[in-house]
Amino acid sequence: MVVVRKYPTAYTNTDSWVDPANLLGASDGNCGSKSGAVWQTYLCYLKTYGFAIPVGSTINSVKIGFKSAYEHVTVFLSFGYRGAGGSTSIYSTAAGVCVDVTVYEEDISFLGITVAELNNETFTSWVSVYVELAGVSGFVDCAYIEVDYTEPAVGIASKRLLVGVGL
């Protein structure tokens, strides 16, 4: 089995997040954040994960996760795929800042995503903040997709050793 965790390397900031580039890559203690009007949701789409899973591999599990802090908001990391979706979310009434980030993870294997769909990125992922009190913010340090897969068996016929003799 191989476990690979990939982080997005690009985003589309549809709702004016502050420092959205901080959502990219592995956890580094720098957050993208969003605050706004009460009872509104604000999105930032994440993309370009760069999967290169060998063709013929068997997907054992797919998880989405993120590191986040919050302040009277609900923060979501969502994954949209073939009309279905899997998401993980958090909620707290306690104040938080970027340094208070916590990891939240959810298995979305039930969606049945394939190797080709991961490699070709035929899915959509996004973080969103749903504001519940005026003047509060949601903070996100990083988001990721983690895939556990088994590589295809390699037969003897595909492991040929070619030996040449030079004159």
Image (cartoon, grey):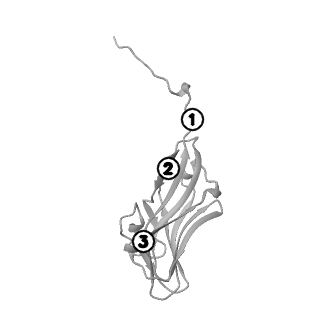
**Looking at numbered disc 3 in the image, what kind of residue is underneath it?**
Val
**Looking at numbered disc 2 in the image, what kind of residue is underneath it?**
Val
Q: Quadrant of the C terminus?
A: top left
Q: Which residue is mark 2?
A: 3
Helix, strand or loop for disc 2: strand
Q: CA distance from mark 1 to mark 2?
A: 17 Å
Q: Which residue is mark 1?
A: 153
Density class for disc 2 (Cα within 10 Å; few <14, some 14-19, many ≥20) is few
> Is tag 2's residue or tag 3's residue first in the polypeptide sequence?
2
Q: Residue 51 location in percent, x, y?
A: 49, 50
> Is tag 3's residue or tag 1's residue first in the polypeptide sequence?
3
Are the residues at dot 2 and dot 3 in contact (C-beta closer than 8 Å)?
Answer: no
Q: Which residue is mark 3?
A: 101
**Looking at numbered disc 1 in the image, what kind of residue is underneath it?**
Ala
Density class for disc 3 (Cα within 10 Å; few <14, some 14-19, many ≥20) is many
Above or below: residue 124 compared with residue 94? above
Q: CA distance from mark 3 to mark 1?
A: 40 Å
Q: Residue 31 location in percent, x, y?
A: 39, 71
Q: Residue 156 location in percent, x, y?
A: 54, 25
Q: At 41% across and 70% down in the image, what residue appears?
A: 20
Q: At 49% across and 72% down in the image, what residue appears?
A: 14
Q: Is residue 76 visible?
A: yes
Q: At 45% across and 71% down in the image, what residue appears?
A: 68
Q: CA distance from mark 2 to mark 3?
A: 23 Å
Are the residues at dot 3 and dot 1 in contact (C-beta closer than 8 Å)?
Answer: no
> Is tag 1's residue or tag 2's residue first in the polypeptide sequence?
2
Are the residues at dot 1 and dot 2 in contact (C-beta closer than 8 Å)?
Answer: no
Q: Which mark is residue 66?
A: none
Helix, strand or loop for disc 1: loop
Q: At 48% across and 89% down in the image, what residue appears?
A: 134
Helix, strand or loop for disc 3: loop
